Image (cartoon, grey):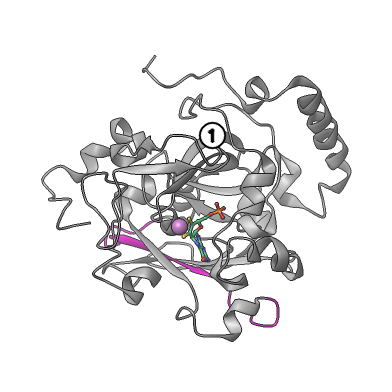
Amino acid sequence: MRKGYRNDLSWADVTPKPLWLNRRQLIAGAGALAIASPAVAKIATVPSAFSTDETPNSIEEISGYNSFYEFGLDKGDPAANAGALTVDPWAVQIDGLVDKPGNYDLGDILSGVTLEERIYRLRCVEAWSMVIPWVGFELATLLDRVGVQPSAKFVAFETLVRPEEMPGQRGRSLDWPYREGLRLDEAMNPLTILATGLYGEEMPKQNGAPIRLVVPWKYGFKSIKSIVKISLVEAMPQTTWNMQNAREYGFYSNVNPEVDHPRWSQASERRIGGGFFAPRIETQMFNGYGEQVAQMYAGQDLAVDF
Ligand SMILES: Nc1nc2c(c(=O)[nH]1)N[C@H]1C(S)=C(S)[C@@H](COP(=O)(O)O)O[C@H]1N2
Ligand SMILES: [Mo]
């Protein structure tokens, strides 16, 4: 087994037992809600070989300190404002260079996928980080189901636009919708997941309910929330932070301690919850996922393709 990874660990192993039992009961109890809420219907928390054995952040930290500009700029705004978001019904339009384009109901997308737990590090470009026990499935599973055509080279994603429920969208803090993109090989990498929950439960709205991307070797802003559109395209798509400031935020945005942000160092990071006096931790190349992803960038100069 590779160093740093265990395939027998789920968050139950790193959570005090009474809390685990409590959550187990919550999951069992959630069975009755399965029809109304497909996103949690099949959370089996199958542990993954890709999970880190680092201690996850608490649910309070993960759902209380967020970046979700649609709900405001401050880290507490999403928790305060996202409750108003309607996440059921929810559909995701899948279009472009695919064999089976359509406006798919979330329930249809989730039928037939096995949700699993992935405990991943999340490294924000602002140099803070967390460890989050996501529940989700590989994006490749969905892309294979809709049939990616040979001419497709990139995948473009868009977040919901609904200013009535998203107060941040009533202003122009960003050019809405929030947009992100991946190269096709990045999208098909087994580390790339669509997440529908965390800590074995339904996704908190502030974390991107009902379905969001998680790309753990890239800066957090690539992991777009509350997705309503996935397009397979030939040309590199426009992405929100690159459109906002191309000099500071590249398309690739792989976590890289050797390429500083123009306004701050990326060599180290602050782990949320560590306390004021906790030492900063060294940021790892590709956020520690190089073994799974480095080969995709062979021959690329990552200081140029930053
Ligand atoms: N639609 C949308 N997705 C988004 C963002 C956003 O503002 N809007 N913020 C990004 C940033 S900067 C980070 S660090 C992560 C944070 O995810 P979390 O709040 O679940 O930790 O979400 C990303 N996805
Ligand atoms: Mo971020």
Q: Relative to 249, is 18 above or below?
A: above
x, y percent for residue 153 = 28, 60
User: Residue 47: where, in percent of width, then height?
Assistant: 58, 26
Q: Disc 1 on helix, strand or loop?
A: strand
Is residue 18 placed above or below 63 in the rendered structure?
A: above
Is residue 289 highlighted in magenta? no
> Is residue 52 found left or right of 104 in the rendered image?
left
In the shown orientation, is residue 61 left or right of residue 271? right
Q: Give the left or right position of residue 170, taking residue 297 as reference.
A: right
Read off the residue under disc 1. 119
Above or below for 20 versus 212: above
How far from the left and from the top, in percent, is residue 113? 60, 42
Question: What quarter of the picture does the N terminus occupy?
Answer: top left
Residue span colored magenta? 148-165
Give neighbour class at mark 1: few <14, some 14-19, many 20+ (Cα, 10 Å).
Answer: many
Q: Quadrant of the C terminus?
A: bottom left
Please name the predominant secondary structure of the magenta segment in the image. loop
Q: Tell me residue 172's x, y (percent).
A: 50, 85
Closer-to-camera residue (269/137): 269
Q: Residue at x 31, y 73 (%)?
A: 245
What residue is at 60 percent from the left and 58 percent from the top?
A: 208
In the picture provided, is 113 more to the left or to the right than 37?
A: left
User: Looking at the picture, which amino acid does disc 1 mark?
Assistant: Ile
Q: Residue furthest top?
A: 1
Residue at 83 percent across and 30 percent down: it is 22
